[in-house]
Each structure stands twice: as C-alpha cells, then as structure tokens.
Amino acid sequence: MTDLAGYRPNVGVALFHPDGKVWFGRRSGAEPPHNWQFPQGGVDPGEELEVAARRELAEETGAVSVTYLGRTDGWITYDFPPELAARGRGFKGQRQVWFAFRFDGDETEFDLTTHGEPEFDEWRWGRLAEAPGLIVPFKRAAYELVVKAFAAFAT
C-alpha cells in the first residue's frame, strides 16, 4: 500500500460521448506525441470529490451538461519525474479518483478558455483504449487503470 501523505489529492474525468468515444484535450505547450490527456485537477480543502471533478471539467473544457456514470475505487497514484518535482508544490506525485461522465450537451458548450488559463489548446473525441499511448509516460500506468475501470462505457 502506498503512503498517500506525499501525494496531492486530485480528480480526473473521462468524458464519454453518447457513442462511447471519450474526450481528449491537447495540453497547451506540450510536445507530441504524448500531449493528449483527460481533464484533471486538484481538490480544494473540504471539497467533495465529485464536486471537484465537475468543477475541473467545467474549468478546463466548459462542459457542464453531463451525467454521472461511475468512479474508480480508492486512489490511483503516480510520481512526478525529477524534472517536474519542483512544480509539485512539495508533493512527490498525485493521488487521483477518476470519474466517468456522459456528455449530454451540444459541442458548442466546449470552451477551452472559460477559466482564463487554458489547460488545452485543442480537443477531439477518440477511443478510450488510445489513452495510455497518448499520455506522458509517467502517467501511463494510471491511465491504464482508468481504461480498465471505465471500459464498459466505451465503444
């Protein structure tokens, strides 16, 4: 069992289209090929995890027309690589609970600039199984667990 004290609390969101595809955002300023990921972000003190997931999703994508599908059990962790450790605010990595939501809105709802500091500069729908190959290598094992947890929602 991993000691979670050194990991920043975080939530992630796999946003599913009704056809079973999933939303990918291209990280602003990140180098290809590992520059696509799902929305994710920190949990504010006292904030409920699902509330944090909905907030992060809205801040990073503009999407609010969503239906809860499920969540992962327990925490999924990953460590920051040494070159990013300084940006980790004293944490060695992140601990995450992931949420699956179905997108019920119109695609015009997506606004990557809604929060003022865009996390993503482009987005697309894709297959859930693609996710581990698109993410930076230090997050790959976490994404493999997310793919396994939410496979029932994918096409």
Image: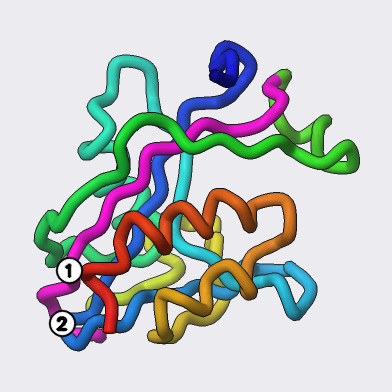
* Lower sequence index among marks 1 and 2: 2
Q: Amino acid at mark 1?
A: Arg
Main secondary structure found in the magenta portion:
strand
Q: Nearer the viewer, residue 48 or 59?
A: 48
Region rendered in magenta: 91-107
Which dot marks residue 82?
A: none
Please rate how many residues cluster around mark 2, counting C-alpha atoms within 10 Å: few if below 14, some from 14 to 19, many from 20.
some
- Identify the residue at image location x=51%, y=31%: 95
Contact between labelled residues 2 and 1, with CB atoms less than 8 Å apart? yes
Q: Is residue 109 left or right of residue 121?
A: left
Residue 117 percent location from the top left of the image: 54, 56
Check the image and report above or below for 5 versus 122. Answer: above
Residue 126 appears left or right of 87? left
Q: In the rendered image of this protein, does residue 60 appear above or below residue 44?
A: below
Residue 23 position by quadrant: bottom left
Residue identified by numbered label 2? 18
Label 1 sits on residue? 102
Tell me the colour scheme of the image: rainbow
Task: Indicate the quadrant containing the N terminus: top left, top right, bottom left or bottom right.
Answer: top right
Q: Amino acid at mark 2?
A: Pro
Tell me the element at label 1.
strand
Q: Determine if the magenta segment contains residue 106.
A: yes
Left or right of 132 in this view: 39? left
